[in-house]
Image (spheres, helix red, strand yellow):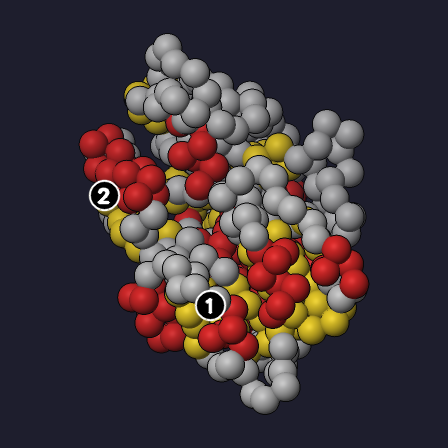
Amino acid sequence: MPTAIAIRKVDGKPGQVYYPLEKIQIPAPQPSTNEVVVRLSAASLNHRDLFIRQHLYPGTTFGVPLLADGCGVVSTTGSSSEASRWKGKRVIINPGTGWKDAPEGPEDPKGYAILGGTKLNPKGMLGEYIVVDAGEVEEAPAHLNDVEAAALPLTGLTAWRAVFSKSGNARPGANILVTGIGGGVALMALVLASAAGVNVWVTSGSEEKIKKAKGLGAAGGVSYKEEDWEKKLLGMLPSGKQFDAIIDGAGGDIVEKGTKLLKAGGVIVVYGMTVSPKMPWLMSAVLKNIELRGSTMGSRKEFADMVEFVGKKNLRPVISRVVQGMENVEAIDGLFEDMKKGSQFGKLVIEFAREGEASKL
């Protein structure tokens, strides 16, 4: 039977436990009429996968393959014409279901269900195969290799919605701040916004990460560890200018800092709150007409739009580290350690088999 990697249950409280990885067997792929079977060649981690191992993510469960991001080739299909046309094509998969095209959020009354590691959508990418509806796949951009393509879906979709759908400022000449550069979403926000002609500025706790971000097109950046870093950042803008929008994944004091950084009516888009699940909303932000907009993942339409844009502009996700072989559980554990330490700059990827090689699984 095909194999995959999931988490194994051990005793421990949410936030204190750290579930170990284990190999599991999954059913042999049997596509229904409108489904495709994707033989996976690479998969990548997101922060939600670390939260799942710590039981800090909704719906965390056992016996479900981990990871929401992956790339592979359609090996077999159901009998429908929509499914059949995908046979033999290299694809990436929409990382969630239940959201077709509504701008405000998922249409499905049960909500949005992301792949990997939960009972809400009991399929994942860290396995030999995945069976999905034919309507959930997109052809992988031709200029990306398997590792890069596997790094794109979730971070690309989240960054696309935050920058293009939510910020309202993804236009040439606008000044946008992307906080916490180094994570996958922040880096994709930088790559996507820069390609749209935006002047992108960054913050990080690491000068080395700021330097790397400049190499990717950032106009400049500052360390958030510096006192009054927002004053230093404003001093880098042309005289009299303030930021049009902030793309943030941390929360914390971003409203306080944003009120000083943003123009009147500026926008803060928050796609995550890694500092704390709560943050203050200040009267100073109200008086300046600052808008705070939550943003998470995106619709099937936004996924297609993002993939098309990446292909048209020949954009590439930033890769931090790659390990070889799904059977190499110790090395995969090492990728999780990178994420726990926050040492990565870009995506962490498992390559099951090099392109052109048959899988050894």
**Which residue, given by chain and number where applicable, does mark 1 sit on?**
229
Q: Is residue 179 visible?
A: yes
Q: Amino acid at mark 1?
A: Trp
Give whichever of 143, 217 is nearer the camera. 217
- 24 relative to 341, above or below: above
Q: Dot 1 lies on which element?
A: helix
Q: Position of residue 264 (x, y in %)?
A: 74, 71
Q: Position of residue 168 (x, y in %)?
A: 72, 67
Give the residue drawn at x 34%, y 48%.
342
Give the residue drawn at x 70%, y 53%.
282
**CA distance separating discs 1 and 2:** 40 Å
- First of labels 1, 2 by sequence position: 1
Q: Image check: 194 left or right of 333?
A: right
Q: Position of residue 5 (x, y in %)?
A: 35, 26
Residue 35's mark? none
Q: Is residue 163 visible?
A: no
Give whichever of 257, 52 is nearer the camera. 257
Give whichever of 111, 97 is nearer the camera. 111
Residue 324's mark? 2
Q: Amino acid at mark 2?
A: Gln
Q: Image check: 275 left or right of 328?
A: right
Give whichever of 254, 323 is nearer the camera. 254
